[in-house]
Amino acid sequence: EGIAERHIPFLTQRFYRVDSDRSRASGGTGLGLAIVAKVLLRHDARLFVESTLGRGSTFTCVFPSSRLKLHPALSPPAV
C-alpha cells in the first residue's frame, strides 16, 4: 500500500504504528522495525525506506564493507 512520507521518520520508534486499526487486526505490536534498527546499529549498518502511497515500500539495509564476510564457498579461488 505504501507509507505516507510523514510517517517514515518514526517507523523505527518502538510501538509506532502507521495505522493502529490495521495493526490491531493483524496482531502487530509496532516493535518489528525498532528491533531491526537496533540490530543494524550494532552492525554499523543503516536502514533506508522508500515508499510511494498506493504502490508499496522498499526497505534497504546497508552494511559497511568492513562488516562483510564472504562464506568460504563464495570466496574467489586462490591464484
Image: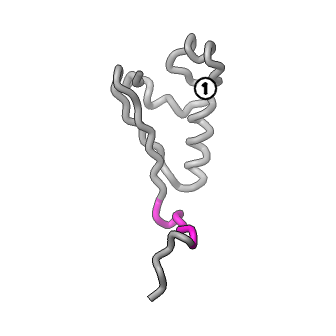
Question: Residue 33 in magenta?
Answer: no
The residue range painted magenta reads 64-72
Question: Residue 70 in magenta?
Answer: yes
Q: At 45% from the left edge and 39% from the top edge, which residue is drawn? A: 59
Q: At 53% from the left edge and 55% from the top edge, which residue is drawn? A: 44
Q: Amino acid at mark 1?
A: Gly
Where 69 sits versus 26, above or below?
Answer: below
Q: Quadrant of the N terminus?
A: top left
The quadrant holding residue 37 is top right
Q: Label 1: which residue?
A: 30
Q: At 56% from the left edge and 35% from the top edge, which residue is drawn? A: 33
Q: At 44% from the left edge and 44% from the top edge, which residue is drawn? A: 60
The quadrant holding residue 20 is top right
Q: How is the image coloured?
A: one colour
Residue 56: percent from the left, percent from the top?
39, 27
Where 13 sits versus 45, above or below?
Answer: above
Secondary structure under badge 1? loop
Left or right side of 8 for 29: right
Q: Residue furthest bottom?
A: 79
Q: Quadrant of the C terminus?
A: bottom left
Residue toward you, 79 or 9: 79
Residue 36: percent from the left, percent from the top?
58, 41
